Image: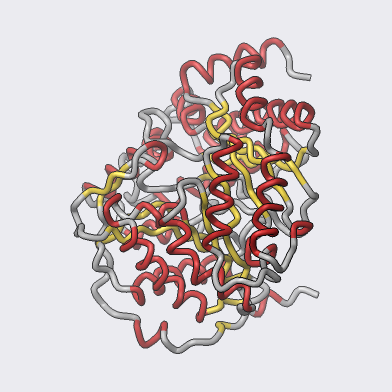
Amino acid sequence: MISRDEIKETNRMIEHSNLDVRTITMGISLLDCANSDEKIFCQKIYDKITTCAKNLVSVGDEIARELGVPVVNKRISITPIAIAAAGVNTSDYVNIAKTLDRAAAETGVNFIGGFGALVQKGSASGDIKLIESIPAALAHTERVCSSLNVASTRSGINMDAVAQTGKIIKQMAELTKAGDSIACAKFVVFCNAAEDNPFMAGAFHGVSERDCVINVGVSGPGVVKSALESVRGADFETLCETIKRTAFKITRVGQLVAQEAAKRLNVPFGIIDLSLAPTPAIGDSIAEIFAEMGIPFAGAPGTTAALAILNDNVKKGGVMASSYVGGLSGAFIPVSEDHAMAHAAEIGALTLEKLEAMTAVCSVGLDMVAVPGDTDADTISGIIADEMAIGMINNKTTAVRIIPVIGKKAGDRAEFGGLLGSAPIMPVSKFSCADFIRRGGRIPAPIHSFKN
């Protein structure tokens, strides 16, 4: 039971520290929609999505009003389309993406994720169609998000997919150059992708999941920052305990919202993802937490250690509050979505290389990083390969959401709007890795992957 004191404390966190439930995400399996006829398949997936999620937005808004807890986004994740549409007789999946966009608009959700493929070991015909369709699909839809899993600790890194990913990122950047290459913000490439992640752009409904499920993502960087203000200057044990206790309280709020949503929608509850996901708002920043820890700017010496402390203790606190903590859970470090991270990049405190080092201890990876528009596809693939290697070797999820902003150079600024925020264009290495990327094939799994 949630006590009266917990309710009062939750109200204070909402009013003064930007506590919110970042998303209620409904996962929907499309496996039973299989059909070789594209029109029939599209109608079946449209009908299933709009039926399952018809009350998702209204229930989320209703819970927010009754509990006084902001529910910022309502979203849908689906079976990766490369799997669900594998038997469809079509040359590409762009019309399927447009159908998903219409279904998302009909239900009123912010985003629908799952226009993706799992190609960590190789690509089947449906995977190839999906990958080739991504640029046009994201350029011509508003709510559709896409992801590829190109590596895993068990399978290694599919370098053919990595090389192709660099090319499709450049293509979607060109197709949406009028909007600062915004399509790239709706695409992420993973190592060890989580099948129950409720956060976009990487959400998809894994094949091991139930037919329909509710996953909730809770976020509270501002709450953690406020808690640390009360122990300013204290030792590391006190610092860690404060983060754990705060994460426990945040997760309890998410648990309550998740249970209510599952009950009212008559859908099984899946997981709580306790990820400290920042927004562009002042006071809702991971980099501001670093400052409270004693690191004035993200990227300064000590930042990686501070992030490791934050990520680990958020997870420790979360698992004490719920038996079903899943997804990614920890700390996100997107550049454009965190005003203080963006500022650190702007003044040169945070470089791409330092950001990569930080990803070894955070929940995801290089997230919402804007780079010069003339960055070539091989360089982008090299950045992806480096991040995939960190995930593969360390048996953790890593990801890249990188945006080559066409027409802009290092030092310029990209404006994405809303929760996506804005960011300075970060410089990249001028030295080529083309010969490495173009070798092709697969980097084998590390020796510690053989656990049987």
Say which residue appears at 74% left-offset and 64% top-offset: 35
Say which residue appears at 36% left-offset and 52% top-offset: 182
The one nearer the camera, 38 or 161, is: 38
In the picture shown, does residue 153 fall above or below 173?
Answer: below
The one nearer the camera, 119 or 386, is: 119
Q: Left of 359 or right of it: where is 391?
A: right
Location of the N terminus by quadrant is: top right
Query: How far from the left and from the top, in percent, is residue 440?
Result: 49, 87
Say which residue appears at 43% left-offset and 53% top-offset: 367
In the picture shown, does residue 115 fall above or below 163?
Answer: above
The one nearer the camera, 87 or 220, is: 87
Question: Total of numbered circles in the picture?
Answer: 0
Query: How far from the left and from the top, in percent, is residue 445?
Result: 63, 79
In the picture shown, does residue 199 fall above or below 161?
Answer: above
Query: How far from the left and from the top, in percent, is residue 217?
Result: 61, 38
Query: How far from the left and from the top, in percent, is residue 386?
Result: 45, 71
Say which residue appears at 44% left-offset and 25% top-offset: 229
Colouring convention used in this rendered image of the protein:
secondary structure
Location of the C terminus by quadrant is: bottom right
Rendered image quadrant of residue 296: top left
Rendered image quadrant of residue 324: top right
Q: Left of 450 or right of it: where is 170?
A: left
In the picture shown, does residue 256 fall above or below 36?
Answer: above
